[in-house]
Image (cartoon, rainbow, N blue to C red):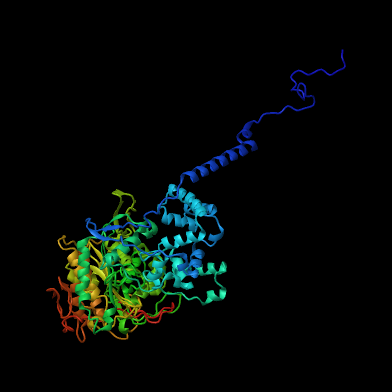
Amino acid sequence: MSDEPQPQHGAGPQEGAPGEPGKKQKRGRTGWRRLVPTWRMVLGTFLVALLLLIGFFALGYYLVKIPPANAAATKQSNVYLYADGSQLARDGEVNRENVSLSKISKDAQHATLAAEDRDFYGESAVDPQAMLRAAWNTATGKGRQSGSTITQQYVKNYYLGQEQTVTRKAKEFFISIKLDREKSKDDILEGYLNTSYYGRNAYGIQAAAQAYYGVDADELTVGQGAYLAALLNAPSEYDVIAHPENKPAALARWNYVLDGMVAKKWLTPAERTGVKFPAPKQAKGSAGMSGQRGYLVQAVKEYLTSNKIIDEDTLAAGGYRITTTLQKPKQDAFVKAVDDQVMDKLDKKNRKTDTYVRAGGVAIDPSNGKVVAMYGGIDYTKQYVNNATRRDYQVGSTFKPFVFTAAVENHSTTGDGRMINPNTVYDGTNKRPVRGWSGGAYAPENEDGYSYGDITVRTATDRSVNSVYAQMAVDVGPDEVEKTAVSLGIPSNTPDLTASPSIALGPATASVLDMAEAYATLANHGRHGTYTLVQKITKDGAEVVDLPSHDTHQAVSREAADTTTSVLRSVVQGGTGTAAQAAGRPAAGKTGTAEEDQAAWFAGYTPDLATVVSVMGQDPDTGAHKPLYGALGENRINGGAYPARIWAQFTRTALRGTPVSDFDLQLQPGAEQTQTPTTEPSTPDTIGGQDDDGGTSDGQDIQGQDQGQSQGQTEGQTEGQTEGQDQGQSQGQTEGQTDGGTTDGGTTDGGTSDGGTTDGGTTDGGTTDGTSTGGTTDGGTTDGGTNGTIAGTNPFGRAPHRRS
């Protein structure tokens, strides 16, 4: 037997393989390792992809040719239509003048590069890294980013279009590379400066220099060039004349441009310090946009661009047919109402203040949010700024209803625990310090220093009593008031919309359109839907643009909105807004007056139409705000006078032929119950009244009126009918005047029927309904009386404000 070891049965394979003694046999990849690609596979895939990419690049470069100039160089017109299809306007006129690069100041050239492409002269025609970054930011919701070099932007402006498609971007990429090889950087910069859109219908820097500063492009200073460069980012939005509320954003962009010039050593730090912002001149609209047409087109463009329906460059290229929601008969009625009530009564030769008078108005159908009429100003060719959309005049006491809505919505109570409703009693003493506010002392002054003592919320609204509403804002919480206003439709970025007690007095500078949207929400029982100005857009006969759906939601409860409506009905029936009765419709509304009488407002609605009107003071040459003292021969211009008269005439005409419908209101529980304070109010300084086309004359006993008014309202509301409520209020006011007595006058109780009491008691055949106790002042009303309130010393850094 051999001494060599014998292989054991079942033993595994021996090391090595036949012919390869001592070597291990290679084992195959098993399990999850089979799913992991090898380095050879990765390298192979990368090389194939690289070859394909090079191939596609070569193919694209070969196939894509530099095309002739596109329609941007021969701009088409956009056609704007009324809702019925009739033509409103056509904006085909092009303001363009090409100049050579040598005719553009170096400062303006450098400013443009600092704003748009600081490494233009040293970089390639495209920047893939910037393009990828822009695509990522857009995809992740950080806003649409450009990511384009000046070469790419020039190609888009001159050779292609503004549409955001993959095909267009691919063409832009290849044409930019070819163009960079065939043209010098100077040629490309010159082309870019001559084709860019700067707003004000100005195409190219020469037209822009004339439109904004009245100079040629070679005369542009550092500051002027930097502003024009800033405009490239948002042409119309950064026009500080058309949109003064956007000046902070425009200044930020202007400073960014100047800082870029310093960074590139085109400007020294010392020179940078000496540059002051050069305010552009007042703009003039083109002749084809005279009258209201220019304002309406401007508003439609802003609606499309701000809602990101069509971007500004694409819209400027033209070719669209845009059907608006504006109704021509209502539009004509608005113009006639403003002319009849204000413009035809101006005496500009003998009263300088009459040259300051401007007006703005918007009417919205509350059921669908459609803007059916808009009044923008005296004439687009004479005043470029749209008074209906500008956000630089204080809204005054038209903001007060939002405070009360917030109170009902949040089930707010007074400092001593009483639920806030229309009949809750507050202390209306002049300069009464608000209680419960930790932000500093605040004691607003009532109009003309009047003190009302014990007064209900309803009557405080009728008389626009500041001390009551400032305290109510604290009781509700200023932050909740701001939240409610935004829910109703006031933009959250509205200038001076600040959560403090003064919010109740209306220092915020919302536009007429903003206020109309918010009041339309109240008219629609608290359901809010963003306004709309456009109902269809077509191009080449096809609908090419999708419009956002008009979805509504319950912004505030129906009880909150409807209870506010019931209070605002009182303002029209017997408060500062009685002139609105001339509309001949059930109406609710509120007057307002801005600081120093620079603007007067009436915001109101019927069940079918919400309309806001503002009469404003503006210097026609400088654009500065101006007080309206003495305008139209009146000591003051307040919301219950000319704005309410415009509102009444327009509403009567606009709704002519439609059935008269009454408000269907669901009031908050307990709204008919008077809530008296548990402590005695401060002793009033004086007892007086505010009058504004039908207010109370001096010496009326407010406390007695409130007592009777509350009794009458309780009787009427118990029956559950609005008519009963109105009768109860009328009866209550009469009883209040009898119980409380009157001194030196009294009031005309009950308002008017189909007319309104102005200049002697009647207008359009209206008659006083009720009795006049103790005589009347000037025939039942004091025409053009004080309307508004002075906010007094404001601890929040603003000057005193006049409100009504």
Which of the pair 23/561 is nearer the observer? 23
Q: Based on the displayed image, in which of its 4 quarters is residue 785 positioned?
A: bottom left
**Residue for point 53% across, 60% down:** 120
Residue extending furthest left?
765
Q: Based on the displayed image, in which of its 4 quarters is residue 729 positioned?
A: bottom left
Which of the pair 176/305 is nearer the observer? 176
Which of the pair 75/335 is nearer the observer? 75
Quarter of the figure that contains the C terminus = bottom left
x then y, percent, for residue 116: 49, 62
In this rendering, would 492 be left or right of 758? right
x then y, percent, for residue 172: 46, 51
Which of the pair 296/151 is nearer the observer? 151
x then y, percent, for residue 129: 54, 53
Quarter of the figure that contains the N terminus = top right
Residue 244 can be seen, yes or no = no
**Residue for point 34% across, 51% down:** 545
**Residue for point 42% across, 56% down:** 157
In this rendering, would 661 be left or right of 192? left
x then y, percent, for residue 118: 53, 62
Residue 763 can be seen, yes or no = yes
Q: Based on the displayed image, in which of its 4 quarters is residue 284 positioned?
A: bottom left
Residue extending furthest top?
1
In this rendering, would 5 be left or right of 272? right
Q: How many marks?
A: 0
